[in-house]
């Protein structure tokens, strides 16, 4: 699975290569600019060849340096290129200064304030700011981008951003914009980034429709998605260089000749009469993803309702928390999932105490988390390393108020990592950019961006299904909590995409067989 770098990690990679004498900064910049032009033409083949018109906006740093390379390369291809720059060239790095000079042999550099004059370009190149951004971008850059877009009238020109959309904090995914700017003021159609994607590309609201990573000749760390990510590095959940079947084959309980007991026995604690849908969704997902057996335990009053709805899922009666100890005494139960539909209060707290005390793989969601809003430390005191918490932002804020989204001073990655450290459990913080963090520092992100969008996954019960999927994966014992949560989150999005718009949560577990087939499993 590909790693996602912070700005500092990227700088360190570049500096190491330059110190080793493997490459010069100017050569990296040249490769970046050339790679950006190639990726642009690959994305829009109609832009191949000459005769097109580009406007390139160059910032004061090395991102601007990349922009001057792009301008020169496009001119070499026979394009008409207008370049507008900002900042004092004497203060730029030697590499950026060199690239500006090389461009100046081809054409002038105008003032950013003049970028609105002229005819509609075919391409706008945003080379204003990259990984060196330290604060909100200046208003003049937002004005210049708007002015070039306005040249285009109703037929918007294509926008390519070099390294990132200017204003993107490459570590947190936040947009650092001047007051009054629209959130999507700098939005691009394509981002071409260099060497590896940065964290910010996969966090928050994506500002670019697509993302291309181009190689600039730096070394890549070897990464095997079947292993835990190295602490300190953020991994994007994706099979990467492995085929999905090879990756998921290490996680899914599909070993030939396996007995149903080899595939795990998942216990789901379900809600009372009329509140059983969430538990049933989780139970069905656990069974569909491959658990050998799934038992749903419900209060006696809900037995009839559930008996009428279940076949392969076994049903047992549980007379409140007092009845749980007896059920948990079955040593073949390999994973317990609880929370969806359970209700908030002391009964649920007691169930969590007992389940955590049973020292089994455990997934805690929804009401199992919210029941500890008044005393999160009491929950953390119960948890162990085989627990996975699956909060959405609201549930997360109840357990970790100081890390809550609305006044989060750190990135979502750092918030989830701190939550995992504090709770001693793997924390899966939901969203289109789902972050999974474990107490040992392993962090992964599953982003439904860049062609993996599944907005229809925001539907009632989808979280209950995710709980069941992770429980099913943990129950068979082949995946540790981090890998099970990662694979569960990935499959959850893939299943939603497999079904498409119109999806309801009931569809998700039932999409798994077809999805598995399509993935070659
Ligand atoms: N270092 C290298 O060897 C390479 C760097 N590359 C490019 O270089 C970029 C990073 O370059 P830099 O570190 O120079 O960073 P940037 O080009 O992102 O910007 C840094 C410059 O902008 C100024 N600045 C930052 N925030 C500002 C704000 N809000 N308002 C006004 N000025 C602001 C800084 O003082 C500095 O002059 C990458 O994103 C990538 O595009 C690539 O060419 C690949 C090789
Ligand atoms: K940029």
Image: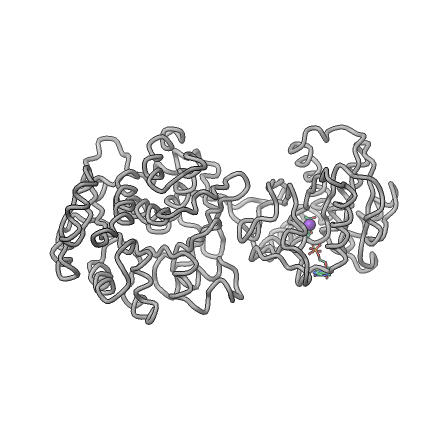
80 vs 154, left or right, is right
Q: Say whether residue 270 is left or right of residue 505.
A: left
Q: Nearer the viewer, residue 105 or 371?
A: 371
Q: Nearer the viewer, residue 200 or 479?
A: 200
Q: Is residue 60 placed above or below 472 in the rendered structure? A: below
Question: Is residue 192 in view?
Answer: no
**What x and y, as percent, mark residue 60?**
76, 56
User: Does any portion of residue 357 appear in the rendered image?
Assistant: yes
Residue 259 percent across, percent down from the top left: 19, 35
Residue 391 drawn at (x, y percent) = 38, 57
In the picture as drawn, the residue positioned furthest to the left comes out as 326
Q: Residue at x 53, y 38 (%)?
A: 451
Classify the position of the C terminus by image quarter: top left
Question: Looking at this view, is 54 or 199 the one in front?
Answer: 54
Classify 148 as above or below 321. Answer: above
Question: Is 55 situated above or below 366?
Answer: above
Residue 453 rendering spot, x and y as whole percentages: 50, 41
Of 231 and 24, nearer the camera is 231
Question: Residue at coordinates 77% horizontally, 57% vertically from top-left?
Answer: 140
Quarter where residue 491 is shown? top left
- The extreme front residue here reads 274
Report the side of 2 relative to 100 (left or right).
left
């Amino acid at each position: 699975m590909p790693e996602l770098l912070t700005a500092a990690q990227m700088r360190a990679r570049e500096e190491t290569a330059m110190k080793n004498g493997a490459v010069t900064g100017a050569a990296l910049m040249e490769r970046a600019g050339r790679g950006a032009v190639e990726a642009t033409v690959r994305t829009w083949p109609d832009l191949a060849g000459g005769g097109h018109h580009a406007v390139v906006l160059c910032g004061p740093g090395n991102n601007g340096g990349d922009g001057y390379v792009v301008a020169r390369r496009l001119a070499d291809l026979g394009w008409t290129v207008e370049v507008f720059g900002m900042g004092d060239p004497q203060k730029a790095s030697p590499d950026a200064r060199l690239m500006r000079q090389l461009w100046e042999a081809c054409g002038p550099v105008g003032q950013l304030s003049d970028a609105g004059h002229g005819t509609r370009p075919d391409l706008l190149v945003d080379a204003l700011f990259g990984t060196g951004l330290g604060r909100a971008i200046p208003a003049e850059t937002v004005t210049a981008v708007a002015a070039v877009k306005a040249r285009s009238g109703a037929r918007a020109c294509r926008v390519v951003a070099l390294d990132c959309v200017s204003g993107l904090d490459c570590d947190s995914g936040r947009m650092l914009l001047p007051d009054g700017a629209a959130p999507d003021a700098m939005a691009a159609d394509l981002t071409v980034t260099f060497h590896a994607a940065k964290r910010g590309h996969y966090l928050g609201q994506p500002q670019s429709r697509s993302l291309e990573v181009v190689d600039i000749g730096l070394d890549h760390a070897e990464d095997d998605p079947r292993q835990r990510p190295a602490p300190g590095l953020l991994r994007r959940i994706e099979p990467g260089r492995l085929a999905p079947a090879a990756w998921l084959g290490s996680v899914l309980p599909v070993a030939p000749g396996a007995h149903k007991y080899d595939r795990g026995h998942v216990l789901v604690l379900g809600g009372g009469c009329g509140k059983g849908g969430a538990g049933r969704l989780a139970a069905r997902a656990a069974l569909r993803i491959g658990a050998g057996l799934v038992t749903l335990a419900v209060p006696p009053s809900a037995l009839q309702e559930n008996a009428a709805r279940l076949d392969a899922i076994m049903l047992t009666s549980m007379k409140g928390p007092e009845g749980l100890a007896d059920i948990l005494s079955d040593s073949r139960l390999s994973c317990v999932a609880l929370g969806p539909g359970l209700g908030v209060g002391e009964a649920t707290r007691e169930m969590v105490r007992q389940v955590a005390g049973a020292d089994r793989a455990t997934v805690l969601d929804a009401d199992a988390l919210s029941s500890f809003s008044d005393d999160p430390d009491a929950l953390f005191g119960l948890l162990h390393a085989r627990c996975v918490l699956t909060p959405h932002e609201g549930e997360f804020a109840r357990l970790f108020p100081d890390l809550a989204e609305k006044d989060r001073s750190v990135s979502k990655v750092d918030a989830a990592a701190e939550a995992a450290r504090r709770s001693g459990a793997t924390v899966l913080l939901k969203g289109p950019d789902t972050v999974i963090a474990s107490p040992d520092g392993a962090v992964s992100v599953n982003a439904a961006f860049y062609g993996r969008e599944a907005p229809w996954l925001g539907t009632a019960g989808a979280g209950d299904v995710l709980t069941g999927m992770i429980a099913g994966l943990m129950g068979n014992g082949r995946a540790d909590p981090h890998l099970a949560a990662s694979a569960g989150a990935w499959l959850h999005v893939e299943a939603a995409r497999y079904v498409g718009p119109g999806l309801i949560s009931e569809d998700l577990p039932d999409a798994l067989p077809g999805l598995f087939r399509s993935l070659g499993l």
